[in-house]
Amino acid sequence: PGRKSANNNAILEAAFIEIEQSFLELSRSTSIPVQQVINWFLKSRGRTTVSTNFWNIYARSYFKDHTEQELARVGHKVPADGGSPGMSIRTKCYDLFKEAFPDTYKDILSVHDEVKMLSASPQTVSQRAQEFQKYYRRM
């Protein structure tokens, strides 16, 4: 197959909008994040999904937001010069984080990531309250 025609592009775009709306509605009605709904859908149809890289969430977001707490796991303090701890220290912190929460560390990091994404998007106070209630009920 070669290049898609303008007509096929229009048909696909209209269908993609409908699919996206379906996922959004399903997400709202179940209080499950859209990406998780999509991943479950793909998995239920035998399709592969991109797996979550929990190290990236930890190193780039969770550790950054909880630096003091995480460094305490390895007996370190935040550097006085405000610098960032090295990769080997972050790796040790991550290993101890996983040991501290062996059954829930993935959930903790996923929720942290979702909260960061939600807090970055512009919402009204009412929308934020609704989203908070959804996450609260899930926990």
Image: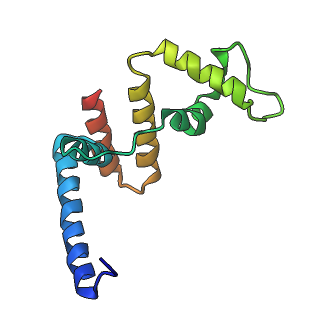
The residue closer to the viewer here, 37 or 12, is 12
Percent x, y for residue 94? 58, 23
Left or right: 37, with 86 as reference point:
left
Q: Outermost residue toward the right?
A: 81
- Taking the spot 43% from the left edge, 15% from the top edge, the residue there is 102
Q: Quadrant of the image for the C terminus?
A: top left
Where residue 48 sits: x, y (%)?
Answer: 31, 45
Q: Position of residue 49 (x, y in %)?
A: 33, 45
Nearest the camera: 107 or 67? 107
Compared with 14, 121 (above or below) is: above
Which residue is rendered at x = 34% and y = 47% of the image? 128
Based on the displayed image, in which of its 4 quarters is residue 122 positioned?
bottom left
User: In screen coordinates, is 71 left or right of 102?
Assistant: right
Could you tell me which quadrant the N terminus lies in?
bottom left
| Residue 32 as seen in the image, left or right of residue 105 | left
Q: Residue at x 41, y 27 (%)?
A: 106
Q: Position of residue 31 (x, y in %)?
A: 22, 41
Q: Residue at x 45, y 31 (%)?
A: 109
Q: Is residue 30 above or below residue 75?
A: below
Give the vertical position of 14 relative to 63 (above or below): below
